[in-house]
Image (cartoon, rainbow, N blue to C red):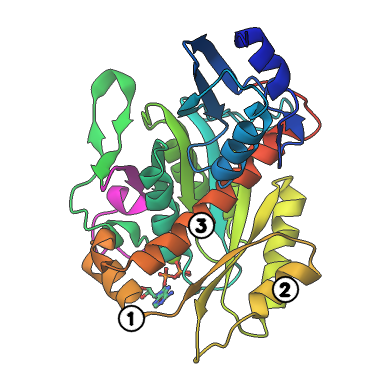
Amino acid sequence: MTDSSTVIEKLKSVRDPELHQDIVSLNMVRDVSVEAGKLNLSLILTTPACPLRETIENDVNEALKEFDDISEISIDWGADVRSTNRPDGPEPIKGVRNVIAVASNKGGVGKSTVAVNLALALSRAGARTGILDADITGPNLPTMLGIDEGLQSTGESGLRPVDSHGLKVVSLGFVLPAGTPVVWRGPMIGSGVRQLLHDVDWGELDYLIVDLPPGTSDASMSMAQDALIAGAVIVSTPSKVAVEDAQKAVGMFDRLGVPVFGVIENMRGEVFGSGGAEAAADDLGLEFLGHIPLAANIREAGDNGDPLDNDDLEIEELFSGIAEQVAARCSVLQFAGEGATI
Ligand SMILES: Nc1ncnc2c1ncn2[C@@H]1O[C@H](COP(=O)(O)OP(=O)(O)OP(=O)(O)O)[C@@H](O)[C@H]1O
Ligand SMILES: [Mg+2]
């Protein structure tokens, strides 16, 4: 008779393809029970946006095939996103497990668009997600998400983010009266960003996406020193200068000790061509996380402040694919060299 311990023993042969450890020692397998030929188990992934769910499911089914007395397998999927942990790094943000920065050296390549859609895709997958607009020079998220209210004070627990499209949103735009010319100087930008990171009551978040201003500005620099960042994603258009730009951004994060998860190619199409950023990622030895086409409805969705209204499943799927790659990089980095359990 097959029992739960036989099943667990057998599942030690199934490895997480990216974390390179077996799913039992990763503590992914829980609540195993066998009753009247039916096997119930929970599989707890390192992210709800796991690109390998199907592979793991197939491998589990394959491994358990030899047990003739099990006629049915029922898997209850869950996810437990771990926190970035770098003992010598800056202070983590309370309640926030992973901060992911979206950056590029160039303006207007689609950082904010990618940041919003990446956050929405993580949220669609079931992750608790927030987004911080750290662009002091031109905060765009309130417009892109159609938000017209600012931060709300909750007294004791600090400032409360705005809930929008399932995301917890905070923008430097909230603290600047509309239309004020931005005259904050370096140190003030630093303290503004620090305050937004640490004084906001984010609640519990699996991922906080930070939309950075272009370049190696004060905001990016101070942020990387003020909060523990899990990793950065670089957005680039497919044009030839993509290599140079990606290189500069990577250089900045290297100096700051922030891992780079990879490169996203945005605005692929006839105007900017395609493949430049992908080749750049290759040249730089970085992961290519996916591409987004140049599409009128992406711009319209951003302008209208209703990003879910683009009615374009194909594009939504592309962003979901990118979100899975980013979440996977995050999990892999957390496990690298650690051999830790969830
Ligand atoms: N894939 C796309 N297809 C069509 N339009 C896009 C796409 N990505 C971004 N855009 C549009 O391009 C413009 C610039 O995008 P966005 O503001 O996201 O860039 P950015 O890199 O954040 O700019 P900045 O450097 O000023 O912060 C916006 O009008 C946006 O709607
Ligand atoms: Mg922007």
At label 1, which amino acid type do we have? Ala
Q: Which residue is mark 3?
A: 321
Q: Is residue 223 above or below residue 311?
A: above
Q: What span is in magenta?
A: 165-182
C-beta proximity under 8 Å, tags 3 and 2: no
At label 2, which amino acid type do we have? Ala
Look at the image and tell me in which quarter the N terminus lies.
top right
Q: Is mark 2 within 8 Å of ligand 1?
A: no
* Label 2 environment density (alpha carbons within 10 Å; few <14, some 14–19, many ≥20): many
Label drawn at residue 189 = none
Say which residue appears at 30% left-offset and 76% top-offset. 297
Q: Secondary structure at mark 1?
A: helix
Question: Which quadrant would residue 252 be assigned to in this image?
Answer: bottom right
Mark pair 3, 1: CA separation? 20 Å
Q: Is residue 36 above or below residue 216?
A: above
Q: Which residue is mark 1?
A: 296
Q: Is residue 189 magenta?
A: no
Q: Earlier in the sequence, mark 3 or mark 2?
A: 2
Label drawn at residue 280 = 2
Q: Earlier in the sequence, mark 1 or mark 2?
A: 2
Mark pair 3, 2: CA separation? 20 Å
